[in-house]
Amino acid sequence: MTFELFQSATYDLLIVRYPHDATLMDGTASLTQFAATANNAGPKFIVVDCGAADASELSFRNVFGVAARKALVFRELPRCRKLVLLVRNELQFGFARMYQTLLDERIDFELEIACDEGTAIESVGLKHDSLETLIAEISVEDRHRLA
């Protein structure tokens, strides 16, 4: 499973894109790997584009477990001030809200849910037409792939 990561030192931002064959559970391993290799204790802002990720395998128990594991990983990224989950459908939104509620007391930063790219981008204080425009601005040497 390959997640696309776009990291910008200029914007102090990490954009994570779920691949089409991923489930929402698959992101934990990629986040753990990124946290282990992040320079300067990670970025200030993280935008996760859930894209076409499948949420149908999720249940409360799954989301509760993922939230607990990811809370530990997020402690390895102490510079993070805001995480924005960009959801693309109602099922993702419902599970994102549950995830937000479960993580809220375990993290030291703001977790926001956005239903469109414009809101996600504005949430981290930037002005771009789309994620594609923002990603195009991020240099090739800052683009990473995590398996």
Image: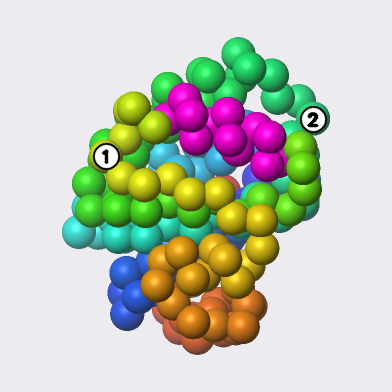
Residue under the point 59% across and 55% down: 114
Q: Quadrant of residue 46?
A: bottom left
Q: Main secondary structure of the magenta part?
A: helix
Q: Which residue is mark 2?
A: 56
| Residue, far top | 61
In front: 136, or 60?
A: 60
Up the image or down, 55 lies above or below 48; here it is above
**Which region shows up in magenta?**
92-103
Residue under the point 56% across and 40% down: 27
- Choose the circle earlier in sequence order: 2 or 1: 2
Residue under the point 41% across and 66% down: 124
Q: Which mark is residue 77?
A: none
Measured from the top left, where is residue 63 in percent x and y? Answer: 58, 24
**Could you tell me the amino acid type at mark 2?**
Ser
Q: Is there any visible trace of residue 95 in the rendered image?
A: yes
Quick one: label 2, few (<14), some, or many (20+) residues within 10 Å? Answer: few
Measured from the top left, where is residue 100 in percent x and y? Answer: 50, 35
Up the image or down, 137 lies above or below 94; here it is below
In this view, the mark in front (2 or 1): 1
In front: 5, or 47?
A: 47
Residue under the point 34% across and 27% down: 105
Q: Is residue 44 magenta?
A: no
SS at mark 1 in the image: loop
Quick one: label 1, few (<14), some, or many (20+) residues within 10 Å? Answer: some
**Could you tell me the amino acid type at mark 1?**
Asp
In front: 22, or 75?
A: 75
Q: Which residue is mark 1?
A: 108
Measured from the top left, where is residue 91 in percent x and y? Answer: 76, 37
CB contact under 8 Å: marks 2 and 1: no
